[in-house]
Amino acid sequence: MKPKLYSIRKVFPAILLCFFSLFSAAQPYQSNWQSIDSRPIPQWFTDAKFGIFIHWGLFSVPAWGPTEGNVYEKYAEWYWSRQNPDGKPSKAFSDFHNKTFGEKVKYQDFVKDFKAEMFNPDQWAEVFKQAGAKYIVLTSKHHEGFTLWPSKQSWNWNAVDVGPHRDLAGDLTKAVKAQGLHMGFYYSLYEWYNPLYKDDLTKYVDDHMIPQLKDLVTRYQPDVVWTDGEWDHPSEKWKSTEFLAWLYNESPVKETVVVNDRWGKETRSKHGGIYTTEYDLVHDQNAQGKKIEHPWEECRGIGGSFGYNRNENLKDYETSESLVHILIDKVARGGNLLLNIGPTADGRIPVIMQQRLKDMGDWLAVNGESIYGTHAWDKSPAVGKETTVFFTAKGKDLFVIVTKWQDKPITVSGVSGASNVSLIGFNGNVKYASSGNKLTITPPSISPATNPCQYAWVFKIKDGLK
């Protein structure tokens, strides 16, 4: 009996269908928002709570912005656009530039002074570790288009070809990872004055942006890809879902990487990964006091600018106490805080910023248990500007974080009992009493010698959540 022969026309469709079925099974995330949005946020991020943003680039040379006006007018990193008549001109920026550098000096000329000669990545990483931060996000490329790594898409406009002649992104990545911290990158989708971007968006995305992003990911394997500059076009034009499908399916960080929500003019607080706020102003639903169910992160500077601003004085900087309170507020509402520093052009973290970070780290060294790995308590009262008692939860334990010390009893509703109540860092006993679903804590008498920390105090209600 002769074997039965099948026509290639009949067999090929079946083979093709089998191939695509296998490919689809190996590619769990498709290039559409429904699929991309189904990917869970990696647990490391929701546990981390505190990260450090770093805005560093050519804008660190003029390092200037106004200290008055709305939030966005204070951003020193927007220097090129603000003093350029083709961008978003500002008389304050142009007047400063002409007076200080002269009308003939162009922004591109600042590259000769961006030397980073005092940049010590190991020292930076030690500062971040001591601050209690768990992840770092460096501006790999801001809207000016200058990259901090040797990107071939930015030939002669990167930190290796010109300026410092050094792979700043790579050196910091090694130091940060050596400290056991997560490393990530900010990346601007658009570039203010790139001729290709202005003349042919599709070619810019295909030949410049996507290859550059993929190079950044494969070269340094970051745990965060934090995009920005998305507002000119919808995500379809940026081909965002195509890139994210590659990132989640094929990249070397597909299991661990976290992305944000800035992928198109329509995506913030709707698509991508974590939702982002900026000085509490970006979205009404993310305003202070609101409870946000989706994983989210607030980013802001210690002062009014992200890039280093020489024009800022002490009054323009948040105090250490204020920064600790900002962290508590965000975490108690289920978010993270990404606190920005702006290094100088020669590669130093300004001492006042180091001091603020150290104070936060000292507080976290005592009270970190109430921050890391916690979540918002579902029975927490609404948080407002006058709130001084915040709550976080972890397992069966409830943490009561008091930002203003009081001697009178603190009553917590929604707690049926506890096996113990303690003041974290305090060696003495804490009196408490339960009645129904309420627990009353009597703060102990503390002196300068027994005070466990500054700025805020944490009562731990052990086994208070049944």
Image (cartoon, rainbow, N blue to C red):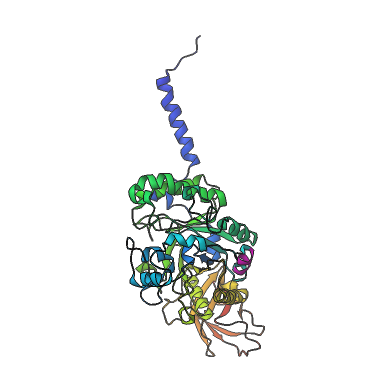
Can residue 148 be seen by looking at this rendering? yes
Q: Relative to 108, does residue 351 appear above or below in the rendering?
A: below
Left or right of 357? Residue 245 is: left
Which residue is painted at 46% across and 35% down in the image?
Answer: 21
Main secondary structure type of the part rendered in magenta: helix
Which residue is painted at 46% across and 15% down in the image?
Answer: 5
- Total marks in image: 0
Residue farthest toward the top in the current orientation of the protein: 1
In which quadrant of the rendered image does the C terminus lie?
A: bottom right
Quadrant in which residue 48 is drawn: bottom right
In reply to whether residue 124 is colored magenta, the answer given is yes
* Nearer to the camera, 190 or 374: 190
Quadrant in which residue 79 is drawn: bottom left
Image coordinates of residue 235 in percent, x first then y, are 36, 52
Span of residues in magenta? 122-127
Can residue 280 be seen by looking at this rendering? no
Q: Relative to 216, does residue 419 appear above or below in the rendering?
A: below
Image coordinates of residue 103 in percent, x first then y, are 38, 66
